[in-house]
Amino acid sequence: MSDEMANRKLSLVKAIRMMERVDLLDMNGHISCRLAEGDSRFLINARAASRATLTTSDVVVCNADGTPEPGGPEPPSEVYIHTEIYRQRPDVYAIVHNHPHWQTVLGIADLPLKPVFSIGSFSQFVPYYERSSLVNEREMGEELARALAGHRAIQIRHHGSVVVGGSVEEVFATAVFMEENAKKQYQTYLVNRNHHVLEGENLKRTQETNWSPKIVRKVWTYHEEKSLISGHLNGLQAHER
């Protein structure tokens, strides 16, 4: 295995375990990333593997159509979320599909995500996909990718969310703070339905100053260190660390 593939697999495993630690993944959900620039293949966690104890041997290499390479484990049934977004969005290098509590609650209540929290202020203009079943057919994956369009996230009503970005670290950080923003929005709504929302120049500056590669790295490092302390990264081989 090349060093590049090994590093990408390790980042994927860490992201999944770290998201499980903060209740953004449970026995379901998946993260993928492109294998390399110009390579149509991608990595994704195996369908049957526990998200809590995932290792690099549980990471599947899939071709552009979602077919695993010979001898590899079975990918998730919703692999078409990933194949079709990668097909339609060459700018996307990593994807999360999960079932976050607060975002899903807002979707059920028909309350669109609004930017109410500084580091989650990118949470705006998040479209909905209205077919709530498993996205386990290519046609549904194509529909979802079209509905996503140029956005960084989409809500699957009554089901969950999909987040896209330029790296595993970026989609991890985005997923964490979309959910934190949704939680704050929900709780504020209970106190006052006419609550403040970031807007105008204040929103623009807040977005510009609260989201950057340095902040993504800071979020990742914080959660990685917390996961090491709590033991959520136990079981990874020394060379995987």
Image (tube, rainbow, N blue to C red):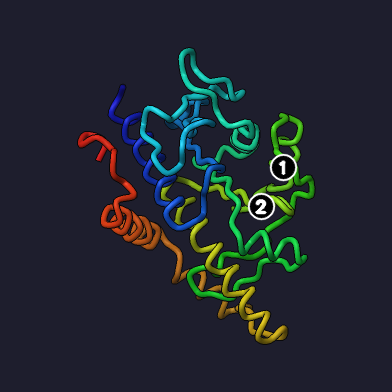
- Residue 187, given in percent of the width and then of the height, sits at 61, 77
Mark 2 lies on a secondary structure that is strand
Judge left or right: residue 34 versus residue 89.
Answer: left
Name the residue: 27% across, 52% down: 228
Q: Residue furthest left?
A: 238
Mark 1–mark 2 contact, CB under 8 Å?
A: yes
Q: Which residue is mark 1?
A: 144
Amino acid type at circle 2 is Ile
Q: Is residue 107 above or below residue 31?
A: below
Name the image quarter holding residue 183.
bottom right
Mark 1 lies on a secondary structure that is helix
Residue 120 is tagged as none
Residue 154 is tagged as 2
Judge left or right: residue 36 versus residue 162.
Answer: left
- Front-lying residue, 121 or 105: 105
- Residue 230, given in percent of the width and then of the height, sits at 30, 56
Amino acid type at circle 1 is Leu
